[in-house]
Amino acid sequence: MKSFFIIVVMILHLPLTFALNLELDTNKWQTVTYSKIPSNKITNVNNSLKVTVNSSSSALVFPFKKTTHIESLFIKARVEGDINYSGLEPGNEGADDFPLRVGLILKGENTLNFFQKALAPKWLVELDTLAKEKGGFDKIHSFIFYTTPPTFKSREHPLSSHFYESVAAPFKNSKIEYTTPLNLKDVIGIWMSADGDDTKSSFTVTIDKIEILESSSE
């Protein structure tokens, strides 16, 4: 009988995990824009989210209601068209465009004061506003999906220490189905972007599914 109660106690203390499919309704995502750069066009097609890029760039944020411990991430998407790098290295100056970046926004203590907001880029002010109710943010751990491979495997973005980027996977036959194990605590939302402003490229990327495996452990 004693061993039975020990097993029960152990089971009760195991972290619970469950899969969560993020809603792809455009009304559930908040748009983050960049100063002096045209924004992408965002629409819903059936149950998918379609991003139309025309020499443009912007991001979408899906804020979580509470901080979340994420154990895995799954992405299913497809692209039509390509990025015109014109011989430049993808990710370098003048060619920092990729069909899809999907990032996890990590909770932190970074918030902008009045003077910092006056000097900060527009996207950072908008992100600060979204993250402030959770206490602030640390950085965005972003996964890059590409058509032409960059030379780096991972990096802190050269223009912003708020972004840590990992090269994830190529679009094969214009499609990706990608999953990766994670152990990221205190995630407060999902960041998703598509960029064609540097290279003056036009393409569409359609996101069919984003699924996270969420853990109840503290």
Image (cartoon, helix red, strand yellow):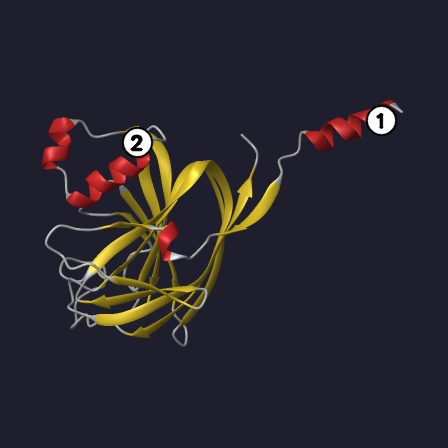
Q: Residue at x 77, y 30 (%)?
A: 8
Q: Under tag 2, what secondary structure? A: helix
Q: Residue at x 26, y 41 (%)?
A: 127
Q: Are marks 2 and 1 in contact (CB under 8 Å)?
A: no
Which x, y percent locates residue 176? Answer: 43, 67
Residue ranking furthest to the front: 27
Q: Nearer the viewer, residue 57 or 163?
A: 57
Which x, y percent locates residue 43? Answer: 33, 64
Residue ranking furthest to the top: 2
Q: Nearer the viewer, residue 44 or 193?
A: 44
Q: Is residue 50 left or right of residue 17?
A: left
Which x, y percent locates residue 36? Answer: 10, 54
> Which quarter of the figure has residue 58?
bottom left
Point out the frontmost of discs 2 and 1: 2
Instruction: Work out whether residue 167 can be spotted.
Output: no
Q: Which residue is mark 1?
A: 3
Which x, y percent locates residue 97? Answer: 23, 61
How much space separates mark 2 and mark 1, taking CA atoms? 47 Å
**Against 213, is 206 above or below?**
below
